Amino acid sequence: MNYEISGQMTENEYSKASRIILLRPRRLVLMFLGILLGISGVSFLTGLKTSNVMFVLMFTVGLLLFNYLIYIPFKMRKTFRKTKKINGVKRWIITNEKFEIISDDSSIKYQWDEIKNLIKTKDLILFGLKSPKGFYQMLPTRILFEKKEEIIKAIEMRIQENA
């Protein structure tokens, strides 16, 4: 396996990838349970009435929805537009030994055993890294052209071999 792909990530692809990473089900459930426990603890300690607790709960849920659906996407778009490292032209080199991302000012190499998991969507491939935990690298599938299926299968095979 030896592929070299050049291209540029779009703002839409960056937003989709960020949303996928942020809205992981386990993370949302843990956050919701933490908020629920926190509100329950505060209401128990202060002796709030049920209607007040419901108001606080609804306000908190509304604030979370605003944060995830409006504020964070706005912030991501702003970051994408300002950061040349994110929106610049990149080269992805995929070989049997490594996965490498080269941009104008930097180069990052990952061995296949450093990749924990793979998240595939119609538009993106996200490489979940073992260290730092929760960190992902992105590869837009539109730049793979006619070799898309072949490259994806080769990547999956390498990750399974090193799992």
Image: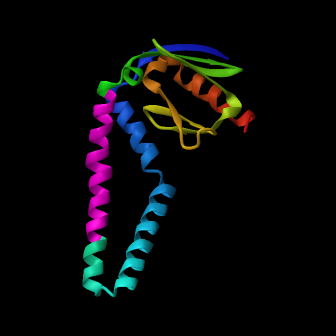
Q: Is residue 154 left or right of residue 73?
A: right
Asked if the magenta segment contains residue 18, the reply would be no
Which image quadrant for residue 32? bottom left
- Residue 136 location (% of width, % of height): 52, 36
What's the image's color scheme?
Answer: rainbow
Q: Is residue 97 left or right of residue 89?
A: right
Q: Give the range drawn in magenta.
A: 58-80
Split into 4 quadrants, where in the image is the N terminus? top right
Asked if the magenta segment contains residue 68, the reply would be yes
* Residue depicted at x 31% and y 72%: 57
* Residue depicted at x 25% and y 81%: 52
Q: In this view, does 4 lie to the left or right of 57?
A: right
Seen as rendered, the residue at the extreme front is 46
- Residue 29 location (% of width, % of height): 47, 62
- Above or below, comparing residue 51 to residue 115 in the picture: below
| Numbered circles on residues, count | 0
Which residue is at the front of the view, 159 or 64?
A: 64
- Residue 102 location (% of width, % of height): 52, 15
Which image quadrant for residue 10? top left
Which residue is at the front of the view, 117 or 114?
A: 114
* Residue depicted at x 26% and y 67%: 59
Overall secondary structure of the magenta stretch?
Answer: helix
Split into 4 quadrants, where in the image is the C terminus? top right
* Residue depicted at x 46% and y 32%: 124
Which residue is at the front of the view, 132 or 123?
A: 132
Which image quadrant for residue 43? bottom left
